[in-house]
Image: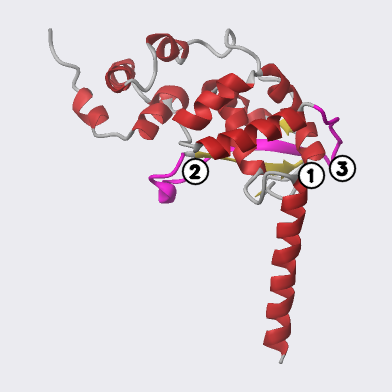
């Protein structure tokens, strides 16, 4: 049996690049190339056979992504998120423990709507970020196409964010467990509690203010 001509190319890819091919960029590859990517991924233990087969299912038969971030959090058990934090994001035990507490706290909060509406936007990073995890989440205000950072957004407002329609297919392919893990890491960049985040923002604001004063002298 002839060897798949794409195997050599796929073997040169990193694990993250293979994941992108199988889960996100599948429409840009031939069936033979996808088979090669799945074979290499299976050899490396990146995906189970059921996961790689799931990647080929039509979006009309795939599960539906919940409408809001709160619904995403409530739809997934933290044990599944934990596996992604350890496996995909290489979080240490201390970080996972802190994120577990954040997840539990989110389950007790009621969402608050943002006006004008803001959507949760899953973006694929450009080639300049080679070596990093290939996705990130941003906010995008209704009626605009300019994403912005969500690191200082209050957590009740995070919960009320709706998943941006144009990136729902990315979320479906990524999986709710990994998507929620990514969001938890994003919302805790500056601290694991809202009090820590507010203190950090105040500290940065004071630093910027002092810099402006020094420049004026």
Is residue 82 something one can see in this rendering? yes
Q: Main secondary structure of the magenta part?
A: loop
Task: Look at the picture and state if 194 lies above or below 207.
Answer: above
At 64% from the left and 18% from the top, the residue drawn is: 77
Q: Earlier in the sequence, mark 1 or mark 3?
A: 3
The reply to whether callout 1 and callout 2 are in contact (CB within 8 Å) is: no
Displayed quadrant of residue 5: top left
Label 3 vs 2, first from the N-terminus: 3
Q: Which mark is residue 154?
A: 1
Provide residue 182's location: percent of width, then percent of height: 58, 35
Badge 3 local density, few (<14 within 10 Å), some, or many (20+)? Answer: few
Q: Residue at x 13, y 12 (%)?
A: 2
Nearer-N-terminus badge (1/2): 2
Residue 113 covered by magenta stretch: yes
Q: From the image, tell me which residue sits under label 2.
A: 125
The quadrant of the image that shows the C terminus is bottom right
Which residue extends farthest left?
Answer: 1
Instruction: Name the residue beneath numbered marker 3.
Output: 115
Residue at 71% from the left image edge and 20% from the top image edge: 66
> For the residues marked 1 and 2, what is the alpha-carbon distance in whole angstroms?
25 Å
The relative height of residue 92 versus residue 148 in the rendered view (above or below) is above
Q: Which residues are magenta?
A: 108-133
Question: In this view of the protein, can residue 138 be seen by the observer?
Answer: no
Q: Secondary structure at mark 2?
A: loop
């Amino acid at each position: 049996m002839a060897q798949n001509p794409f195997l050599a190319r796929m073997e040169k890819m990193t694990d993250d690049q293979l994941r992108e091919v199988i889960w996100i960029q599948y429409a840009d590859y031939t069936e033979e190339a996808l088979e090669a990517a799945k074979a290499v991924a299976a050899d490396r233990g990146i995906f189970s056979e059921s996961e790689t087969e799931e990647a080929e299912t039509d979006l009309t038969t795939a599960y539906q992504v919940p409408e809001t971030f709160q619904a995403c959090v409530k739809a997934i058990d933290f044990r599944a998120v934990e596996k992604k934090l350890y496996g995909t994001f290489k979080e240490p035990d201390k970080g996972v423990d802190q994120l577990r507490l954040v997840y539990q706290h989110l389950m007790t909060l009621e969402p608050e709507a943002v006006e004008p509406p803001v959507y949760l936007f899953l973006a694929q990073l450009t080639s300049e970020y080679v070596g990093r995890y290939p996705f990130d989440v941003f906010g995008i205000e209704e009626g605009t196409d300019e994403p912005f950072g969500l690191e200082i957004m209050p957590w009740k407002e995070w919960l009320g964010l709706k998943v941006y329609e144009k990136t729902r297919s990315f979320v479906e392919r990524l999986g709710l467990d990994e998507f929620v893990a990514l969001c938890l890491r994003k919302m805790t960049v500056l601290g694991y509690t809202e009090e820590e985040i507010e203190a950090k923002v105040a500290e940065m604001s004071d630093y910027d203010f002092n810099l402006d004063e020094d420049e004026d002298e």
